[in-house]
Image (cartoon, grey):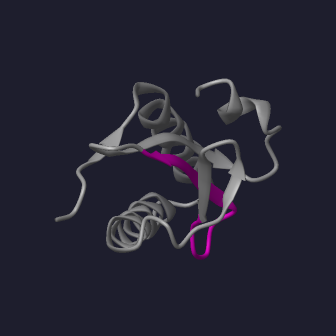
Amino acid sequence: MSLPLLISREARSDIVEAIEWLGEQSSELPSRFRQSLEQTYVSILEYPEMYSTIHREFRRALLRHFPYAIFYVVEADAIVIVGVVHQARHPSTWQRRG
């Protein structure tokens, strides 16, 4: 049985911010970014332990074709996305969300 995927309020805010910024760069980037997010979500759901633990219980999945990473925690009853952060951002951006 697959665990549900929950996206935190902070992660949703990260996504909106990224989509707005990408939209300023090119009108087609936001839809490509969403598609990359969805593909990575599917991968996380299928193989949640596949991605490396990088800080305490946090795992990181890199998006294809975008310099963003999804930070998540595998809990007993759900997979929780805590951040979708540009890789150049300081780690404290997502670490303090745990």
Report whether 67 appears left or right of 43.
right
Quadrant including the C terminus: top right
Prevailing SS of the magenta stretch:
strand
Q: Position of residue 54 (x, y in %)?
A: 72, 53
Q: Quadrant of residue 6?
A: top left
Between residues 9 and 22, which one lies in front from this camera angle? Answer: 9
Q: With respect to residue 21, does 93 lie above or below?
A: above
Q: With respect to residue 11, does 31 lie above or below?
A: below
Q: With respect to residue 65, does 45 lie above or below?
A: above
Residue at 30% x, 45% y is 78
Residue at 47% x, 30% y is 13
Report whether 35 appears left or right of 77.
right
Q: Position of residue 76 (x, y in %)?
A: 33, 44
Report whether 48 appears left or right of 56.
left
Between residues 27 and 19, which one lies in front from this camera angle? Answer: 19
Between residues 15 and 94, which one lies in front from this camera angle? Answer: 94
Report whether 76 appears left or right of 70.
left
Q: Position of residue 91 (x, y in %)?
A: 79, 39
Q: Residue furthest front?
A: 76
Q: Position of residue 14 (x, y in %)?
A: 53, 36
Q: Residue furthest left?
A: 1
Q: With respect to residue 89, does 8 lie above or below?
A: above
| Count of numbered labels shown in the rendering | 0
69 part of magenta stretch = yes
Q: Quadrant of residue 2?
A: bottom left
The stretch in magenta equals 62-74
Between residues 4 and 63, which one lies in front from this camera angle? Answer: 4
Residue at 16% x, 65% y is 1
63 part of magenta stretch = yes
